[in-house]
Image (cartoon, grey):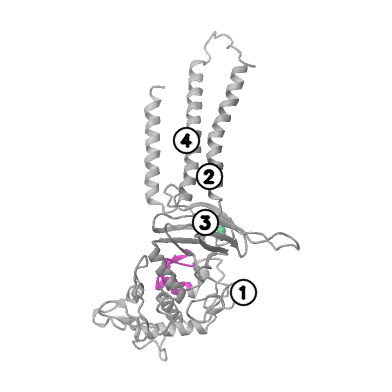
């Protein structure tokens, strides 16, 4: 027993250190909650964990003690029989019952705490699970977005969740526990209305929090991820403003690039967006999103420097100002089958089947976490989405998908559309 204590202490401290390490390295940990909802759940976890660990420790010590102390020796007499000992029977019935009360009462009170009615000033967001992406609707602001949910810090957020197809599960580990997202069953006549599943929380720390679908829902279940952007009120307001108008780029001619400043300049006749580029979204210039090397002496026509795979007659062969390419991308997007499924605020595109692409260039991922958002990945995605995310319902340029025929876009058209989508931020 004496030699066991130090190694036990070492094991416990190693586990504790490993826990801290994991907390700083893994973005999807439940052990660093950023909402009161997450903290309540963590409290229940630790309460239960501590009680059960204490019980385990006592049981192990008693077993070891009994095994050594009462082990069989040659000529040992028959042990004293304790069957039917009333005191012992009462003790080992009452003690566990008391422990269950200490675990049960805080757990039940947390259930009531987290299921309470949302306060009047709560931000209401409708969450709709799709195979395989997330839709977020903000009725208060009349905006719709996908896979990236913005919330203001310090304000209660009330999610009303349902599914458009199969059962999904909404889970942002640092904000709180997972909750099923169910398809709403059809009502029979005279039946009371079925309601959504709800989740209520207040995020306290600004930041980006990762989450994912936590219920197997088909082929691309593993790539049904999402991010929550928790921002200070003014940054959130600025995001709302950009989402409502579709950002400065979609309201008129795409702005030209200022070669000196390397920043986007608002086109003539447009109201400058004072808050654009501020807050959590870093301003990314087209030069950063196109991978082709750009000679320093010819920085201005950035997109004109792209290698041109097609030959004569290609309108993109000659160096073009990027504004023209973006405009071309916008034109192709608006006149192709893209708009059957996708909507972009501030434009005629109003498809409802696929994710909204309003300010899609500002999102961190393509295809609900399939790849990082950049020009090269976006081109690969538009050309052949199934090779990036097996199962996705989006058609490619040569492959059908989700019951839709191939888009038939050429490589140059895909590059223009990708550049246009990236500029939406
Ligand atoms: Cu949706 Cu798994």
- Looking at the picture, tell me which residue is in the foreground, 81 or 157: 157
**Mark 2 element type:** helix
Mark 3 vs mark 4: give the one in front: 3
Callout 2 environment at 10 Å: few (<14), some (14 to 19), or many (20+)? some
| Location of residue 316 by image quarter | bottom left
Q: Quadrant of the C terminus?
A: bottom left
Highlighted range, magenta: 359-381
Query: Considering only order in the chain, which callout, 2 or 4, is on the residue closer to the N terminus?
Result: 4
Query: Considering only order in the chain, which callout, 3 or 2, is on the residue closer to the N terminus?
Result: 2
Q: CA distance from mark 3 to mark 4?
A: 33 Å
Q: Is residue 166 left or right of residue 366?
A: right
**Mark 1 element type:** loop
Mark 3 vs mark 1: give the one in front: 3
Callout 3 environment at 10 Å: few (<14), some (14 to 19), or many (20+)? few
Residue wearing tag 1: 403
Q: Which mark is residue 210?
A: none
User: Above or below — where is 59 with respect to 393?
Assistant: above
Residue wearing tag 4: 50
Q: Is residue 118 left or right of residue 270?
A: right
Query: Considering only order in the chain, which callout, 1 or 3, is on the residue closer to the N terminus?
Result: 3
**Mark 3 element type:** loop
Whole-percent x, y for residue 220 in the image = 55, 62
Q: Can you see residue 215?
A: no
Quadrant of the rendered image holding ligand 1: bottom right
Mark 1 vs mark 4: give the one in front: 4
Q: Which mark is residue 119?
A: 3
User: Above or below — where is 95 with respect to 417?
Assistant: above
Q: CA distance from mark 3 to mark 1?
A: 43 Å
């Amino acid at each position: 027993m004496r030699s066991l204590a130090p190694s036990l202490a070492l094991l416990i401290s190693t586990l504790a250190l490993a826990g801290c390490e994991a907390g700083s390295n893994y973005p999807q940990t439940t052990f660093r909650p950023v909402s009161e909802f997450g903290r309540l759940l963590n409290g229940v976890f630790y309460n239960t964990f501590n009680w059960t660990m204490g019980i385990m420790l006592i049981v192990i010590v008693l077993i070891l003690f009994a095994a050594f102390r009462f082990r069989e020796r040659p000529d040992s007499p028959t042990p004293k029989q304790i069957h039917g000992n009333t005191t012992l029977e009462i003790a080992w019935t009452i003690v566990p019952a008391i422990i269950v009360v200490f675990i049960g009462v805080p757990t039940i009170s947390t259930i009531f705490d987290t299921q309470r009615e949302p306060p009047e000033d709560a931000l209401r967001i409708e969450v709709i699970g799709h195979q395989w992406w997330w839709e977020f609707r903000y009725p208060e602001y009349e905006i719709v977005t996908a896979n990236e949910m913005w919330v203001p810090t310090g304000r209660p957020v009330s999610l009303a969740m349902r599914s458009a197809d199969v059962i999904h599960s909404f889970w942002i580990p640092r904000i709180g526990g997972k909750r099923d997202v169910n398809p709403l069953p059809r009502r029979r006549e005279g039946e009371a209305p079925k309601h959504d599943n709800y989740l209520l929380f207040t995020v306290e720390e600004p930041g980006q929090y990762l989450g994912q679908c936590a219920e197997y829902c088909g082929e691309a279940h593993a790539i049904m991820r999402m991010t929550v952007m928790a921002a200070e009120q003014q940054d959130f307001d600025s995001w709302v403003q950009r989402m409502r108008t579709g950002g400065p780029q979609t309201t008129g001619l795409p702005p030209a690039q200022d070669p000196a400043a390397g920043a986007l300049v608002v086109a003539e006749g447009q109201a400058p967006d004072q808050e654009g580029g501020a807050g959590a979204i870093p301003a990314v210039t087209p030069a950063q999103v196109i991978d082709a090397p750009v000679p320093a002496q010819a920085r201005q026509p950035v997109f004109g420097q792209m290698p041109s795979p097609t030959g004569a007659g290609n309108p993109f062969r000659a160096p073009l100002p990027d504004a023209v390419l973006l405009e071309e991308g916008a034109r192709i997007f608006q006149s192709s089958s893209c708009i059957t499924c996708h909507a972009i605020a501030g434009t005629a595109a109003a498809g409802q089947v696929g994710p909204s692409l309003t300010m899609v260039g500002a999102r961190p991922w393509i295809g609900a976490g399939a790849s990082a958002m950049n020009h090269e990945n976006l081109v690969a995605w538009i050309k052949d989405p199934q090779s990036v995310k097996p199962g996705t319902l989006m058609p490619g340029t040569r492959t059908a998908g989700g019951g839709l025929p191939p888009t038939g876009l050429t490589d140059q058209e895909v590059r223009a559309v990708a550049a246009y989508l990236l500029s939406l931020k």
